[in-house]
Image (tube, rainbow, N blue to C red):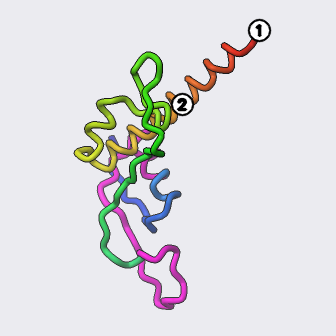
């Protein structure tokens, strides 16, 4: 695994880039921010400040399990992923969200085929 540093503004694009770097085999060891001389130019309000990266829960308050009881049909996480969410690291949360998105695509696709007469 190759070590890397990443420019970080705290936005969603940086979060996605961090996830994709890990997926592609990079070990991101530090996040680099900048503080522009002109304070009127800010990529995001947090630029130049220290902040912990936080990944919010994908829960959308639907909270209903699928028929086979494997995933929530609201966020597409498994019961164990939901139960362990608060103890996961940010990189683990990003992996859970990516897996849930894949489950959603798969389940929605299966539903399309079931509707075809």
The residue under the point 30% across, 43% down is 85
Q: Is residue 43 one of those drawn in magenta?
A: yes
The residue under the point 38% across, 53% down is 55
> Camera-side residue: 21 or 54?
54
Q: Is residue 32 one of those drawn in magenta?
A: yes
Residue for badge 2 = 104
Q: Position of residue 79 (x, y in %)?
A: 33, 30
Q: Kindly identify which numbered label has been placed on residue 117.
A: 1
> Camera-side residue: 48 or 63?
63
Element on which disc 1 rests: loop
Disc 2 or 1, which lies upstream in sequence?
A: 2
The residue under the point 74% across, 13% down is 116
Report, in whole angstroms, how far the alpha carbon at label 2 lies from the one at label 1. 22 Å
Element on which disc 2 rests: helix
In magenta, the rendered stretch is: 17-46
Q: Residues within 10 Å of mark 2 (few under 14, many from 20)?
A: some
Q: Position of residue 8 (x, y in %)?
A: 43, 65
Q: Position of residue 76 (x, y in %)?
A: 46, 33
């Amino acid at each position: 695994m190759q070590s890397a540093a990443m420019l970080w503004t705290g936005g969603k694009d940086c979060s996605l880039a961090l996830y994709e770097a890990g997926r592609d085999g990079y070990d991101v060891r530090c996040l680099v921010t900048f503080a522009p001389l002109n304070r009127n130019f800010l990529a995001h309000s947090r630029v130049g400040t220290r902040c912990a990266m936080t990944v919010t829960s994908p829960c959308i308050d639907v909270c209903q399990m699928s028929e086979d009881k494997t995933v929530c049909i609201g966020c597409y996480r498994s019961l164990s992923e939901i139960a362990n969410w608060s103890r996961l690291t940010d990189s683990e949360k990003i992996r859970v969200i990516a897996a849930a998105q894949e489950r959603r695509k798969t389940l929605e696709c299966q539903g399309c085929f079931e509707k075809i007469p």
